[in-house]
Amino acid sequence: MSRTTGSLIFEKRDTRLLLVVGGLHTLTQTINLIRTMILAPMENRPLNWGMIIQDRITSWLIGLLFAFLIILTTKRLLNARISWPRIMAIHVLTAFVVSIIWFATFIGISMLIYSKEDMGDEEWHFWIWLVGNFDKLFLMYLITVCITYTYYYVQRDNDNQVQQSTMKSQLLQTRLKMLQSQLHPHFLFNTLNSIVSLIDTDIKKAKSMIADLGDLLRRVLDNRDVQLVPLREELEITRKYLDIEKTRFSDDLTVEWEQEGQLADADIPGMLLQPLAENSIRHGFSRSHPSLFLRIIVQRAGNRLKILVSDNGQGIPESEVGQIFAKGAGLSNTYERLKTVYGDDFIFEVENTHPGVRNFIDIPARGKG
């Protein structure tokens, strides 16, 4: 899954913003037209309606073009994840450049439409005109930028609320799926069967297995209403799950953990790691692979969190690899929740490595870390 930070072109959801900015620009040109109509008689200037209308239409069209370019620039900066001082510096520089290009375009078109006598001597002096009107254009630029930022921040806030609501629903569904589809009948049945067998042979292991199962269920239920959980909690749930599996498989299952970077307070979607470990165990053991080595690597690199779960087992049937997110009960749900939380800003890969399976997740590192 590739990472993107936002579309650089207009989307359907931008229609309202374009209408607002276009309406504002239309209102500005209308006010300028009314202003000309009022001031001309007061200054004893004749009203050349043909020239006035052409002038306003030309200014309106050029203004709309540059307004939309300003929106695109602002949208890109908004999604660029750069510091505010740098964004402000870019906007100030862009405002000067846009002002010069805007006026150069307007005057160039005016020179093609009107004669020197129609425009007046003073209007042929580009820099005089630019200095005299720069404040108006600069103000229009700032207003357009402010409207754009306000629109996208409100939109982002609404999206976050929808995401939180969707995440809560999906998380509850995931908890139920784990208890019903994963713990019962497969994992839960096998665990209870192992406990029954151990009661007659090793009561100490049986008690330990019961305690681990109870702790696992308690942790899962405790987090059922939580959208993001501390990474340390997710690691503990996965360890409890693997402790139970190691008791079942004894020496046939070996688990190696590697943790790098500041991970203590990083937050991730709940039940993200356990399905990966279960997927490896489910597909890893076979008659030709009676033992399994499972490696789990969790590392933080800058503002990214990387999770790698790999094994040396049988692997996933090749016919199922391309549809693992659609057919794998745990992994399809994991993929959908990653999509909901991070949009396109994540990587989730599952592939056969012959031997074994490689599960890799790359997500933004949220939390204090």
Image: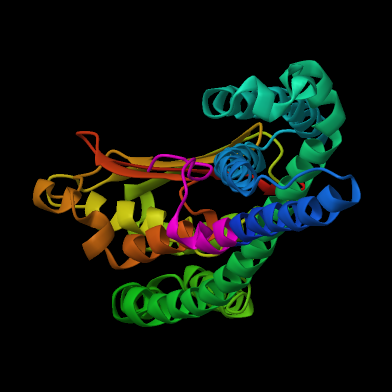
Q: Residue at x 75, y 51 (%)?
A: 32
Give the total number of marks visible in the rendering: 0
Nearer to me, 279 or 321:
321
Q: Is residue 203 visible?
A: yes
Q: Is residue 276 above or below residue 255?
A: below
Left or right of residue 21: residue 332: left
Q: Residue 44 colored magenta?
A: no
x and y, in percent, of residue 200 in the image:
38, 78
Bounds of the magenta span?
A: 1-19
Using the image, determine if residue 199 lies above or below residue 110: below
- Please tell me which residue is depicted at 77% across the width and 47% down the height of the picture: 368
| Magenta stretch contains residue 12 | yes
**Which residue is farthest right?**
42
Q: Nearer the viewer, residue 121 or 81?
A: 121
| Residue furthest left in the image | 319
Q: Residue 230: in sight, yes or no?
A: no
- Percent position of residue 249, x then y: 34, 57
Quarter of the figure with the N terminus? top left
